[in-house]
Image (cartoon, rainbow, N blue to C red):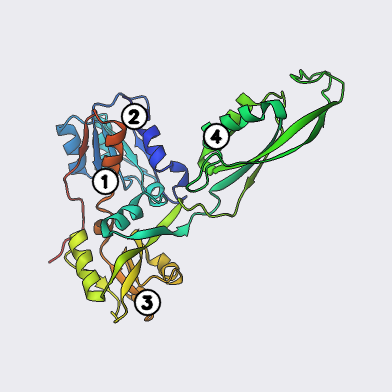
Amino acid sequence: MIVKDFITALEELSPDYYAEDFDNTGLLIGEKNMEVSGVLITLDTLEPIVDEAIKKNLNLIISFHPIVFSGLKKLNNSTYVERVVHKAIKHDIAIYAMHTALDNTSNGVNGMICQKLGLKRRSVLIPKPNTIKKLTTYVPVANAEEVRTALFKAGGGSIGNYDLCSFNIEGEGTFKGNENSNPKIGKRGITQFEKEIQINMTYSAHLQTKVLNALFESHPYEEVAYELETLENNDQDRGIGMVGELETPLGATEILSYIKEVFKTKVIRHSELNDKPIQRIAVLGGSGAFAIDKAKAAKADLYITADLKYHDFYKADNQIILADIGHYESEQYTKDLIHAFLTKKFPNFALVLSNINTNPIQYY
């Protein structure tokens, strides 16, 4: 197994294409063709994590948070980031980070929070824009099924819980090749009238190269006519935060006690409580103050997130309860998610879940 094999698998879970522009995800240290002796999965890549990888002979670390977030101008071991990078390079350890790519996946960070809380009827809180593309192409009737099938295999035509989706219109196309053409249908210099089918198909934005390659390889024409559009439709599987519902409503103190138990947190910072039953809950792992208004607009009774500042709590405005459970606490189960996913993909490979607590915040 090489590093690239694990990257390919992780791209199925959370394509790096959907990471936020400010983020630093993907392969941060190492080479894609490096042989992998074993994988260590962690929330953060700190020096003790690298030491654990060295001790256990694991040369690929898959981390949720990136250890290198902004540019490094020197490597003299004067900061914790420089020490991690230096030690990883010295011991030929590759580091791969997922972060907001996994945040923007419905089965990722926030899906895991919903799962732990037992929330049902889930949906994305803030859909990520420009994630659905549309392809329109024109194919001879005799070749339409072959082209459609190739596009489906490349991931085209999948919409939410449905696949093999397309819209087809029959018509007549015309074309004439010049002296430099080499038409596969018709003759050079003669206008060709051809019964065609216009195939319309949506696809996830990260699959565009794969879909276009399938189109070019399966299409019979020398010059393939096609159009691409970016749709404003929301993809129900792409975006940050989630909203779900408890099967049975709980009181405010009951739900806070439940959250403390599930997330093993010693303290929850929260806004003023009320007597309203809590059933609809919005969640966003990590720093989520920016989504308070979105949680209110989603008619959530409670919003679970982290890193709220003093004035953020005023935004509850008696419309919602805000619960800050801690950054680490909200994301702690992410590494379990990654480990479970990779174990299904590589059941007989050394995949080690780090047991080191990387939370920098202590409670007195």
Residue tagged 3: 316
Q: Nearer the viewer, mark 1 or mark 4?
A: 4
Based on the displayed image, in which of its 4 quarters is residue 91 positioned?
top left
Residue tagged 1: 335
Determine the secondary structure under disc 2. Answer: helix
Q: Nearer the viewer, mark 3 or mark 4?
A: 4
For the N terminus, the quadrant is top left
Amino acid at the residue labelled 3 = Ala
Residue drawn at x 57%, y 30% is: 149
Based on the displayed image, in which of its 4 quarters is residue 348 positioned?
top left
Residue tagged 2: 3
Compare residues 294 and 111 and report the one nearer the observer. Answer: 111
Determine the secondary structure under disc 4. Answer: helix
In the picture, the disc for residue 152 is 4
Instruction: Work out whether mark 2 precedes mark 4 in sequence or the reverse, and give the earlier one.
Output: 2
Residue 79 visible: no
Amino acid at the residue labelled 1 = Lys
Task: State the separation of the CA atoms marked 1 and 4.
Answer: 32 Å
Amino acid at the residue labelled 2 = Val
Residue drawn at x 50%, y 45% is: 162
Amino acid at the residue labelled 4 = Phe
